Amino acid sequence: MMGKPTSVDTSFALGKALRLPSALLVLVLVALYSANAPQASTAQSVPQPQAAVTAPAPAAPAVAPEASTETSATAVPAVFSRNRAQGLSPKVLAMALDAVSAARARGISGRDDRLTVIDYSLPSTQPRIWVLDTERGKVLYHGLVAHGAGSGDKYASHFSNVNDSRATSLGLFLTGDTYEGGNGYSLKLRGLDPGVNDLAEMRHIVMHGAWYVSDEHARQFGMIGRSWGCPALAQTDAQSVIDTIKGGTFVYSYAASAAPSVLRASYRTTSVGKRALRASSRTSSVTRHSSSRSRAAVSRHKAKRAVTRIAKAPARTSPAFRTTRATR
């Protein structure tokens, strides 16, 4: 009877002793879970920024072709500005490229690998013509070029499209064939801007070499010589430059103060044509409507002159003359 209570007390004490490690074990498990839970959430959140960073990558190729399709109007000036283009103004180059683009839009075709730019804003003693290789982004030639005697002395300030003005024409030209003329090896130029330079062929505006285009002439006279409107080059350089740009390349002539002069030249050309047309119409009208009256007037004039001659004739006193006059 006394042994039973002892076993019960023993089992109760053992259960109480076991509950303490169980509680510690639960606490340890909770601590481990709480420690692992932030790591799991952090591990799950890491791929999300990676996905956000890598997502724009496929869009990059879509932008690259658009940039590559931009041609001469933006890419070429950037190339030449990096190479500094030996003094060529980026503004003038951009205007030249815009003129070429406008000409192509009108259906005018030309070579893409060459572009010649002349900046007549600069004095004639300073190199102001550039021959550009637009494919490789290089300056092939940079030298002196003359303007017309009708455009000014050291600086060109007046430009014209009028024949016999001996002035330089501005705007966009297209090179043609070569020939041997009075100025030697020469290159034909076709003006592409109506009212500004479209009479270049009629005016015989060509590119050729000239003895007066030289540094020595500039030192001696304070300016290089002047042409009759042609962009004349140094004789030592003319043939190589002409061979480089002949056969359908574009030549752009620019001047900063050109707009008023060019407009005046265009206006004069148009006015001369209209005056000539009106004069021709008046002449035709007079000839057509007064032809019969003119013939009658001529007849009366001849008769009057005959009467005057007879009246002024000297008197004849011989008997024979008097008899003859009497019998008549």
Image (cartoon, rainbow, N blue to C red):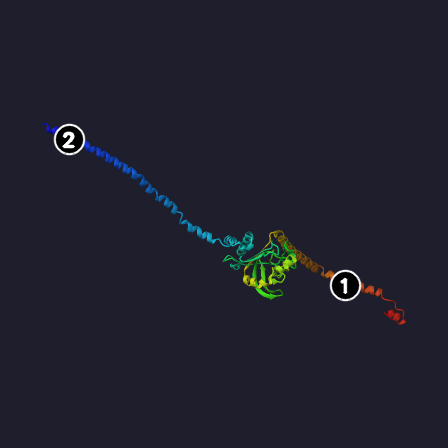
Q: Identify the secondary structure beneath mark 2.
A: helix
Q: Amino acid at mark 2?
A: Thr
Mark sitting on residue 10: 2
Q: Residue furthest left?
A: 1
> 50 above or below 326?
above
Relative horizontal placement of residue 33, taking residue 132 as reference (left or right): left
Q: Which of the 4 image quarters holds residue 99?
A: bottom right
Q: CA distance from mark 1 to mark 2?
A: 171 Å
Q: Residue at x 26, y 36 (%)?
A: 28
> 157 above or below 15?
below
Does residue 28 show up? yes
Q: Identify the secondary structure beneath mark 1.
A: helix
Q: How many marks?
A: 2
> 6 above or below 45?
above
Does residue 166 show up? no
Q: Earlier in the sequence, mark 1 or mark 2?
A: 2
Please name whichever residue, 290 or 256, is drawn nearer the observer in this view of the structure.
256
Q: Residue furthest bottom?
A: 320
Name the residue carrying label 1: 299
Residue 116: give x, y in percent of width and height: 55, 58
Residue 259: give x, y in percent of width and height: 61, 52
Label 2 environment density (alpha carbons within 10 Å; few <14, some 14–19, many ≥20): few
Q: Quadrant of the N terminus?
A: top left
Please name whichever residue, 266 or 282, is drawn nearer the observer in this view of the structure.
266
Q: Quadrant of the C terminus?
A: bottom right
Label 1 environment density (alpha carbons within 10 Å; few <14, some 14–19, many ≥20): few
Between circles 1 and 2, the one closer to the viewer is 2
Whether tag 1 and tag 2 are in contact, CB under 8 A, the answer is no
